[in-house]
Amino acid sequence: MTLQVLQFGATGQLAREVLARQDRNVAVKALSRADVDLADPAAVARAIAAEPQVDLVLNAAAYTAVDRAESEPEAAYAVNARAPEAMARACQARGVPLVQVSTDMVFSGAGAGAYVEEDPVGPLHVYGASKLAGEEAVLAYCDRASVMRVSWLFSAYGSNFLHLMLRLANTQPVLKVVDDQRARPTAAGDVAAFILSQAARLARAPAGASEWGRLHVVNSGCATRVEMARAIFALAWPDRPAPAIEPVPTSAFPTPARRALNAELDASRLARVFGLQLRPWQEALEDVIAEMQPQLAPA
Ligand SMILES: NC(=O)c1ccc[n+]([C@@H]2O[C@H](COP(=O)([O-])OP(=O)(O)OC[C@H]3O[C@@H](n4cnc5c(N)ncnc54)[C@H](OP(=O)(O)O)[C@@H]3O)[C@@H](O)[C@H]2O)c1
């Protein structure tokens, strides 16, 4: 029988990638902002309660404007913390598991190595704190909840570092790119594929099983922003001289929300519990850029 996933979010990077990957085994019903405004927790709860058949709820939506959140904390907390809480309570009431997507930005970046799931958190800004509050609420109110932290998402759609670099390369002779932030760039499509591949297992897993709790879901390999920018240009325009990059420190780009320097997530729990690791980020980037080829003709 086809597994039914109810997804919050329809237009975001991850939401689109999940929708594109549904098949005869897993059907995804996506709720857009027009269907359910996540700022309204009662509407969130009603949507879950009213769905005729649902085997798994996936929250792929979020307030993701990291800098704007500094001046809109109420909106960030409503969407990133209170909506997931409403989802968790409604899922618990229906006996349905919940996948909540979270972020590396719950960490301060002060640690030297890669962060494991149990490492102490310390968000540097409102967005990170609101996502952390969402994690805590989901784990407190639903005993079959997975909090999947992802990092530096990229896809052929939406607003991300890949698109920013390609746009700037066509308009600026020299690109200033920060070289002191590092993380694991991750394809939204690879996260989507992982979630759908595990949907049946998650739908069956009882409370207390190893599947539940926090999980880092990131591609293999780490990069700085400069390394990622160089890889983007080499793959996007192999026959054209690479745009000039001037490496600069994060302090050269003052932003309302301070960025962590080390956002590297360790994914060994993913290997231990699910027996797999996601492919290297460069391979995933190559596929995404191939998907974008028609848009990449030199300006
Ligand atoms: N992007 C990254 O680099 C990154 C890194 C780490 C973690 N994450 C996490 O990964 C998840 C997916 O991120 P993403 O990059 O796919 O996000 P995205 O592209 O910014 O999309 C966010 C989605 O949330 C929806 N949304 C926002 N406010 C809403 C509201 N009030 N009611 C209903 N829907 C609302 C948006 O709908 P509209 O289109 O209608 O605005 C959009 O579909 C999020 O949990 C995010 O925190 C992302």
Image (spheres, grey):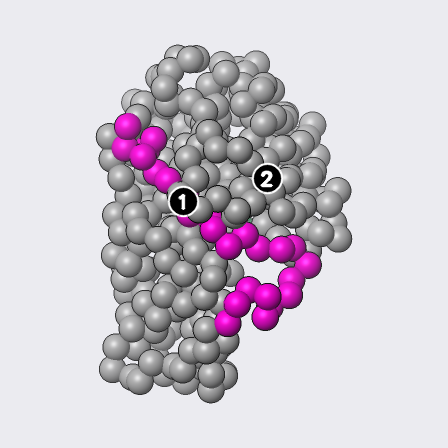
Residue 270 found in image quarter: top left
Q: Please, what is the three-letter code of the amino acid marked with disc 2? A: Gly
- Residue 130 % position (x, y): 64, 39
Residue 86 image position (x, y, % from top left): 63, 26
Observer-nearest residue: 237 or 219? 219
Q: Which residues are magenta?
A: 248-272
Residue 207's place in the image compared with 26, above or below, is above
> What amino acid type should be assigned to the residue bearing mark 1?
Gly
Residue annotated with mark 2: 122
How many numbered marks, from 0 up? 2
Disc 2 to disc 1, how far (Cα)?
15 Å
The verdict on label 2 being within 8 Å of ligand 1 is no
* Crowd tier of the residue under label 1, counting other residues whose Cα lies within 10 Å: few below 14, some 14–19, many 20 or above: few
Please state which of residues 197 and 151 is positioned toward the viewer in this rendering: 151
Look at 40% across and 43% down and name the residue there: 114
Specify whether residue 163 is in view. Answer: no
Q: Which residue is mark 1?
A: 113
